Image (spheres, rainbow, N blue to C red):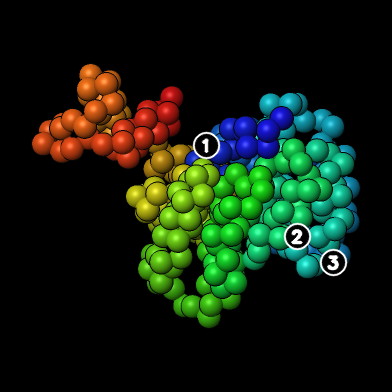
Amino acid sequence: MNPLETTLAFCTNFLFVPGTRPDRFLKALNSGAGGVIIDLEDAVGVDDKEKARGLVRQAWTDFSDPQKKQLVIRINAPGTQFYGADLALAQEINAPCLLIPKSESRDQINGAAQILPTTAIIPMIETALGLDCLKEIANAQQVLRLALGNLDLQADLGMVCDEQESELLTARFQLVFQSRVAEIAPPIDGVTPSTTDENRISADAVRAKRMGFGGKLCIHPNQISLVRKAFEPSAAEIEWAQRVVQADQDSHGGAVKLDGRMIDRPVVLLAQRTLSKAK
């Protein structure tokens, strides 16, 4: 299978679940999340890394094929003592998608792709070096989409962000921009630390959508419905997109005005994407 032919390219929400909690794997899959990230990195202590790999290996045989297509394995960062064993596990279970934290170069991604030729890769940008090398990372082999590690990036840059993370707007723009240039799926925004502040969760998700992100990372099931709702096209957006596509068809691809606005190819592509999300 082409590693880029996966529904994970269109997911608007991804729920983390610790690799040491196999009792939560199926719960996460049944939570309504579009994608489920089994975490071998931050959610697993140093002394439990091997145990987590064993639990994932054991649970993998019980997942159905449709469930496996929802799953992403977040391994430990390149250069750590756990990276090689994590890649070996991903190869053994034929993981459909890998989230590589602290991605900082094209070579890191291409190296993983050589070992896992049928696995889609989501590089996670969490450091200044990763942000500096963003263009080459986005264009590396088998990259499905990018993801932002907003909390780690703040720490790496020595930032103290406000509640809206205004200081990270430039970084977020770069992820959206380089994804578009590389012609990969829109990136995945980082987490909202609060699991109970619904206004903050919704506001963060709406900001991500407005900036051009295609989804958002979730750390608790309570966040899923709020994030999904924020990314769903509104009735007005769907109606507008339908009219744009119809106007384009009527003009046979030529330039045309709709409501006094010129409808050119980028506008049509945006409308088509909106209708695709609505389905």
Residue drawn 24% across the image and 28% down it: 254
Q: Amino acid at mark 3?
A: Gln
Secondary structure beneath dot 2 equals: loop
Tell me, yes or no, if residue 259 can be seen here. yes
Q: Amino acid at mark 1?
A: Phe
- Judge by depth and name the residue closer to the eye, 123 or 137: 137
What is the residue that sits farthest to the bottom in this orientation? 158
Left or right side of 267 for 56: right
Tell me the crowding category of disc 1: few under 14, some 14 to 19, or many 20 or more residues within 10 angstroms, Cα based: some
Which residue was labeled with disc 2?
76
Secondary structure beneath dot 1 equals: loop
Q: CA distance from mark 3 to mark 2?
A: 9 Å
Residue drawn 56% across the image and 73% down it: 128
Image coordinates of residue 91 in percent, x first then y, are 83, 44
On the rendered image, what quadrant is the C terminus found in? top left
Q: Amino acid at mark 2?
A: Asn
- Judge by depth and name the residue closer to the eye, 202 or 7: 7
Q: Dots 1 and 3: beta carbons under 8 Å?
A: no
Tell me, yes or no, if residue 205 can be seen here. no
Left or right side of 88 for 28: left
Which residue was labeled with disc 3?
81
Residue 265 sits in quarter: top left
Residue drawn 85% across the image and 47% down it: 89
Which residue was labeled with disc 1?
10
Q: CA distance from mark 2 to mark 1?
A: 24 Å
Residue 242 sits in quarter: top left
Label for residue 172? none
* Earlier-in-chain disc, 2 versus 1: 1
On the rendered image, what quadrant is the N terminus found in? top right
* Earlier-in-chain disc, 1 versus 3: 1
Q: How many marks?
A: 3
